[in-house]
Amino acid sequence: MKIKKLIIAVATFAIVFSACVGVKSLADNYWVGHGEIQTINNNIDTLSNRVKTKNQTISDLNNTISTLKGSVDTQSAQVSSLQTQLAQANTDKQNEINAKINEINSKIAEGNQKVADK
């Protein structure tokens, strides 16, 4: 009987010891994995922040491009308007010059006629 109790006690001790070693091993593996998961999550957060920053920069640059395009369109319209005004001013000035030339030619013709009449 003593041997039977001893065998049962040794077997129970072996089972409990094996279970404890198994639980410790499982816990160690869990905690090692937990640290790696935290590192991965930190890396994901870092990358996510970088992507958000880059997207904000892209958005800001797109807004700047839109503003500059509007400015270019406004400036182009002003240039077109000024070119039209310049063309009209040149036409008006040429008409004035032609009128003066005609007036001078008319005065010359009058002068020639007066000379011819004398």
Image: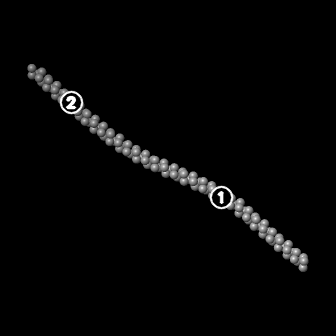
Say above or below: 96 vs 56: above
Name the kind of residue labelled 2 in the image: Lys
Residue at figure coordinates x 71%, y 60% from the top left: 32
Say above or below: 81 vs 49: above
Where residue 59 sits in the image (x, y, percent)? 49, 51
Residue at figure coordinates x 78%, y 69% from the top left: 19
Residue at figure coordinates x 48%, y 49% from the top left: 60
Q: Which residue is mark 2?
A: 100
Q: Which residue is mark 1?
A: 38
Residue density around tag 2, few if under 14, some if 14–19, many if 20 or more, within 10 Å: few
Where residue 44 sits in the image (x, y, percent)? 61, 56
Which quadrant of the figure has residue 74? top left
Circles 1 and 2 in contact, beta carbons < 8 Å: no
Secondary structure beneath label 2: helix
Name the kind of residue labelled 1 in the image: Gln
Along the line of sight, the residue nearer the viewer: 110 or 82: 82
Say above or below: 5 vs 98: below
Secondary structure beneath label 1: helix
Residue density around tag 1, few if under 14, some if 14–19, many if 20 or more, within 10 Å: few
Which quadrant of the figure has residue 89? top left
Distance from disc 1 to disc 2, alpha carbons, whole Å, reads: 92 Å
Residue at figure coordinates x 35%, y 42% from the top left: 78
Labels 1, 2: front one: 1
